[in-house]
Amino acid sequence: MITYEIIDAGNKERAEYGLEDIAGFLHKHLDEFGDDPDSIKKAIRYAWQKDGGRGGFVTLGHENGEILGAVVVNETGMGGYIPENILVYIAVRGDQRGRGLGKELMNKTIERAEGDIALHVEPDNPARHLYEKIGFTNKYLEMRYHK
């Protein structure tokens, strides 16, 4: 049976899985949509702080000592024109996809989040359809300038 767990600044020390476990899982299972391990760890550390306007949480699905899926949410400290939360990473282990785990992780994440949630998804990412089914909409075209 899959266990779902929310890990934040208040319970990270007691959690079954730590920074290295979660970052390693995400790095492996984000496939071509992922980032380097240091960037993933940075997002998790941000989520697990409660000072300097930082915060957030990690939602995990695990079973028999193995992580099956993970979500990292960073709180923005804003609201209105910028959503209160940014879903930074979500991944489900390849052999677990198509079983509803991603949807359940999203539902647990939405339930826990205070305020709106934004996420970035590439147009060819198959998870895009899940996000649309849950109720995410595409209102803006995101553009970035890199110095």
Image (cartoon, rainbow, N blue to C red):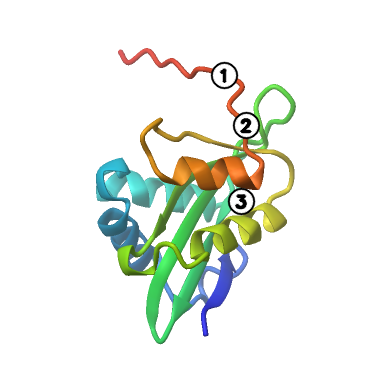
Identify which amino acid the numbered label 2 is placed on. Thr
- Identify the residue at horizontal 54%, vertical 48% (top origin): 73
Residue linked to disc 1: 140
Residue linked to disc 2: 137
In the image, residue 58 sits, relative to residue 95, either above or below, namely above
Is residue 8 visible from the viewing direction of this image?
Answer: no
What element does badge 3 sit on?
A: loop
In the image, residue 138 sits, relative to residue 73, either above or below, namely above
Q: Position of residue 120 (x, y in %)?
A: 47, 34
> Real-space Cα distance between discs 3 and 2?
29 Å
> Real-space Cα distance between discs 2 and 1?
9 Å
Q: Nearer the viewer, mark 3 or mark 1?
A: 1
In the image, residue 107 sits, relative to residue 95, either above or below, namely above
> Callout 1: 10 Å neighbours few (<14), some, many (20+)?
few
Residue linked to disc 3: 50
Identify which amino acid the numbered label 1 is placed on. Tyr
Is residue 81 visible from the viewing direction of this image?
Answer: yes
Q: Position of residue 70 (x, y in %)?
A: 45, 61
In the figure, is residue 94 to the left or right of 128? left
What element does badge 1 sit on?
A: loop
- Identify the residue at horizontal 36%, vertical 52% (top origin): 41
What element does badge 2 sit on?
A: loop
- Identify the residue at horizontal 39%, vertical 72% (top origin): 67
Identify which amino acid the numbered label 3 is placed on. Lys
- Determine whether label 3 and label 2 are within 8 Å by CB: no
Q: Position of residue 19 (x, y in %)?
A: 38, 63
